[in-house]
Image: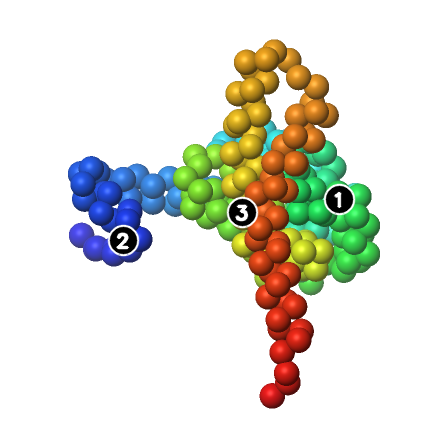
Amino acid sequence: MPKINVYLPDELAEAVKESGVPVSAVCQRALEQAVRRVTAIRETALGDLDLDDPTARLAHFTGRARMVLKLAVEQARADGAPSVGTQHLLGGMLAEGGNLALHVLRAVEIEPEQLGRHLARESSGTEDDEDGTARHFSSPAANALELAVTEATALGHNYVGCEHLLLGLVAEPDGTAGQVLRALGAEPRLTRRAVAAALAGYVHLRAQSQAAGPAMPADTAKALATAVRQEVQPLIRRIERLEERLNTAPEA
């Protein structure tokens, strides 16, 4: 049987040894799940989208994430595009309107309306040089979907949500959506930290609202954005200080 080496941070490796966790079984289970999810993504990305539900294979995607994909397909067809590109995935995320990814973007000071304007300006072209009517995902869009699965797995999540899709779009180097997001400041490391903070804040706020009774969605959204912004501010300040040093450094 082939062997795969797994490298762990020193502290985690010591904790694993002390606890006696069956590393091989855990890794095998995690890899099996990741392979199934990536396979489902590839089958969906490469398959024919002329189906009643193009997201039928993606049971591990949340309801909102599946809705984003459906809206992306609809936008691509409305545009007469040959494929569903990353710009359509991001457009679907904006059109869905209530997902966690939008709260993350607001926390890093990117307003959805601002993002929509930039996306419209940069989406005049297509990511595949083909004729037709959106029968499949473009190569960058398929890559972004695979990266979303990778991000979810890395965070230890057994689902893929809009926040993971955002991370996939930010990390994908060639698509229109990633270029627009990064130009507005959604750098991968910052966005990943903001997603982690948003998820932690969401769990905390949900527990509070359940204890206190029904809360207004607007209040919850505002509190969540504030919590995430506080979490990512130290990283933003470090990046700004680094940029200042680079700008003031003497030229060689």
Is the residue marked by circle 2 packed among few (<14), some (14-19), or many (20+) residues within 10 Å?
few
Q: Compared to 246, does 232 lie above or below?
A: above
Q: Which residue is the site of mark 3?
A: 193
- The image's mark for residue 10 is 2
Q: Secondary structure at mark 1?
A: loop
Q: Is 233 on the left or on the right of 156, as rendered?
A: right
Q: Return the disc, 3 or 2, that comes first in the chain's sequence.
A: 2
Q: Are marks 2 and 1 in contact (CB under 8 Å)?
A: no
Q: Which one is in front in this view, the residue at disc 2 or the one at disc 1? A: 2
Q: Residue at x 54, y 39 (%)?
A: 197
In this view, the residue in front, 240 or 129, is 240
Q: Quarter of the image holding residue 24?
A: top left
Q: Which residue is most to the bottom?
A: 252
- Using the image, tell me which numbered label, if any, was put on residue 111: 1
Q: Residues within 10 Å of mark 1 (few under 14, many from 20)?
A: some
Q: How is the image coloured?
A: rainbow
Where residue 54 sits in the image (x, y, percent)? Answer: 60, 37
Q: Are marks 1 and 3 in contact (CB under 8 Å)?
A: no
For the residues labelled 2 and 1, the Cα–Cα distance comes to 40 Å
- Going from N to C along the chain, the mark reached first, 1 or 3, is 1
Disc 2 is placed on an element classified as: helix
First in sequence: mark 2 vs mark 1: 2
Locate residue 3 relative to residue 37 in the image: left or right. Answer: left
Q: CA distance from mark 1 to mark 3?
A: 18 Å
**Please, is residue 231 above or below residue 202 in the view?**
below
Q: What's under tag 3, amino acid-wise?
A: Arg
Looking at the rendered structure, the kind of residue marked 1 is Glu
Which label belongs to residue 30?
Answer: none
